Amino acid sequence: QMVASNIGNAFPKIWQDTMSVLQDQCPAKDFSVVKSIIESEYGKPLSEVFSSFEEDTIGAASIGQVHRATLVDGSPVVVKVMYPEVERLFRGDVRTIKMFAQVAQPVHVPNLEEIEKQFMTEFDYRKEAKQMANVRINLIKGGLAGGPTKLCAVPKPYLDICTKRVLVMEELKGEKLAVGLEKDMERHATHAGKTLEQFRDEEEQKARELKNRGITKQGPSAREYGQYIKFLDGQRRLSNAGFLLYNLTLGWIPGMPWKNTLDKSVLPINHAKMVDDLIYIHGHEVLVDGYFNGDPHPGNILLLGTKSGESQLGLIDYGQVKKLTKEDRIRMCHLILALANDDRNEIIRLMKEAGYKSEKMDENTIYLYAKVSYDEDNDDLTGGKHIQLFMEDLQSRDPILEVPKNFIMVGRTSIMLRGLAHALHQSRSVAKLWKPIAEKVLQNEGGED
């Protein structure tokens, strides 16, 4: 998933294209296998739990697959079914990767150990369902979820019928982020009078040319996107008025075609606002709730409400939720403020306090590790290197012995969100977007336990 998301542009594109299917497009198992797992988990026929169950999947990942179904009370749901062999295979894979990393990439061993620990909840859907319910409650309480006008929606799990290998939750009506972005690019290509392939190739060429000149391509701001979308919406309304006039006049003539009006799904996505919202929501989870999803890759994000124009993010999959203590939250708030203000001395002090250790304790290395792990990555910081190569370079300069273990998943979340932002030419400083949240937490809770 890390490679599939091409976190921070850290991996070659061919790796990303190859691994992208692991997010939600893996080959699905035959329905007879799925039915057998469900009936084994419930100890009763599938028909006694679900009045209908679609045999075709709506997504399949490496550990299981998802189907639409209807409960016996008529409630529409989606059902995640876990393959019985995945936990054993995963443990073997991680053991192999760790052995390799210990020899060739020791800087990644602490991260792998933390990710392995977090992944264990992925193999018990009862735990994942409870985590999903908790995040949902927290975001509703924080005013970020709970209705179509809020920034996001998290599906409600049906806790009483979730088992170790079956997770039942409400269905969020929308489309996968990758699908929505592909459609969005097609709309931009159409407006430019080009095919999708031509438009994509030209955009990538522009980005390469800018990079060769030492410039990172940055897309429009949320405000600029909003103005552009408002202009296109005006054109849409004028077109619809013309269609209605036609339908009420010429459209009644036998043999004349009827013209359908255009809904708001034809309008572009505000990439800048979407990135800002995603980063803000996860900042709230980390700093306010201390309970956050450490796996926000694009396969776990849906686009909702595009037809009505009430754009909203659907956030799914809570198998890797990390819990922070109040002490950890407060320390991370202080670190976020130091990073946002680029206070090198305070960044270094807080990193040492959090448990960072290296052979030489080189202060510049500590500073750079913190910036890239939790805040931002750009050519000024990395010297134009991929994050992977940059972190290896830090390791060679001053071998890292210990990293702040409780903040590994915070770093992973930050890097994943920035990877999506980079892909949309919406590079961000996570610390600057989280700064208002951190300031409010410190004001309300202070630095004392």
Image (cartoon, grey):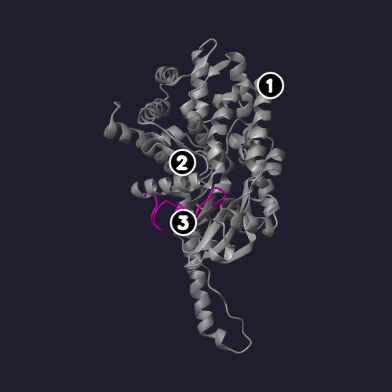
Locate residue 52 relative to residue 88 in the image: left or right. left
Helix, strand or loop for disc 2: helix
Q: Amino acid at mark 3?
A: Ser
Quote the CA–CA distance across marks 1 and 3: 45 Å
Q: Residue at x 64, y 32 (%)?
A: 94
Q: Which residue is mark 3?
A: 311
User: Which class describes the residues within 10 Å of circle 3: few (<14), some (14-19), or many (20+)?
Assistant: many
Magenta-highlighted residues = 144-166
Taking the magenta stretch, the answer to whether it contains residue 158 is: yes
Other residues around mark 1 within 10 Å, as few (<14) / some (14–19) / many (≥20): few
Local crowd size for mark 2, using a 10 Å CA cut-off: few (<14), some (14–19), many (≥20):
many
Q: Is residue 256 above or below residue 425?
A: below
Horizontal and vertical percent position of residue 279: 46, 41
Mark 1 vs mark 2, CA separation in Å: 33 Å
Q: Nearer the viewer, mark 1 or mark 3?
A: 1
Q: Which mark is residue 279?
A: 2
For the residue pair 365 and 138, the one nearer the viewer reads as 138
| Residue kind at label 2, given as amino acid type | Ile
Q: Quadrant of residue 440?
A: top left
At a point 49% along the width and 37% down the height, the residue shown is 428
Could you say which is closer to the camera, residue 296 or residue 343?
296
Residue that sits furthest to the front in the current view? 43
Whole-percent x, y for residue 92 in the image: 67, 33
Where residue 47 appears, as percent x and y from the top left, is 57, 66
